[in-house]
Amino acid sequence: EVQLLESGGDLVQPGGSLRLSCAASGFTFSDYVMNWVRQAPGKGPEWVSGITGSDFRTFYIDSVKGRFTISRDNSKNTVSLQMNSLRAEDTAVYYCAKGGRGTAMVFDYWGQGTLVTVS
Amino acid sequence: EIVLTQSPATLSLSPGDRATLSCRASQSVSSYLAWYQKKPGQAPRLLIYDASNRATGIPARFSGSGSGTDFTLTISSLEPGDFAVYYCQQRYIWPPLTFGQGTRLEIK
């Protein structure tokens, strides 16, 4: 059974930093692209960042480039999102989402989410 | 950036009814469109990928169609657990991957 468990969400002041982590199990982690998708209150989901499985190519939405860094540890089956220079508009529930093989960006499994509040 | 526009914003139907949800892309996304279901307090759930393929474990009452810029999610006979918010998402041209703003399916 695929499981994704996020952690690290918190209340942080504008300009602050936070590191989110996602522990994955139930699949061959290194074969799949992993993503962070966020959802602000009352809005639709917004893809934030992704990282490929074995060559660690990274992708970001423009609004977080230079502030957020995605990384993964295939030996520990974890993916992380380092968030710096946080803004009020970064407030959202952040979901870890499993993609497909290669860069197939269909999110077939999601974690339960972790809340980031910037205030 | 590809913008996805979903309609209607809210759809009020009864259990047993047929639901038809629309997603229109600002430019062609070929068949690279997915649909997700979101319930309060739960993670989103993949329903349909590549326009018409049901994800693992998704009941046959959910179906998807379309290509290019116009897509439809159909729920043939609504069950109580189907009342939720539905989002479409494209993966044809990215980054960024983009989602629609959602259609809320509510009980009439």
Image (cartoon, coloured by chain):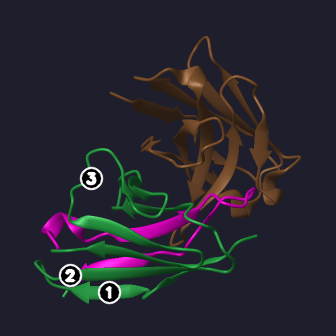
Chain colours: A brown, B green
Q: Secondary structure at mark 3?
A: loop
Magenta segment boundaries in residue numbering: B78-107
Q: Which residue, given by chain and number where applicable, does mark 3 sit on? A: B58
Q: Nearer the viewer, mark 1 or mark 2?
A: 2
Residue plotted at (77% across, 49% down): A60
Q: Which residue, given by chain and number where applicable, does mark 1 sit on? A: B11
Three-letter amino acid code at disc 3?
Ile
Of pointers 1 and 2, the one earlier in the residue sequence: 1
Query: Which quadrant is home to the N terminus of chain A?
Result: top left
Q: Secondary structure at mark 2?
A: loop
Of pointers 3 and 2, the one earlier in the residue sequence: 2
Distance from disc 3 to disc 2, alpha carbons, whole Å, reads 17 Å
- Residue B18 — which label? 2
The subunit letter for the residue under badge 1 reads B
Residue plotted at (42% across, 60% down): B36
The percent position of residue B107, horizontal first and vertical second, equals 20, 81
The subunit letter for the residue under badge 2 reads B
The part of the image, by quadrant, that contains residue B84 is: bottom left
Of pointers 1 and 3, the one earlier in the residue sequence: 1
Q: Residue furthest left?
A: B16
Residue A119 in view here? no
The percent position of residue B37, horizontal first and vertical second, equals 37, 62
Three-letter amino acid code at disc 1?
Leu
- Residue A29 — which label? none
Q: Find out whether residue B23 is within the magenta segment.
A: no
The subunit letter for the residue under badge 3 reads B
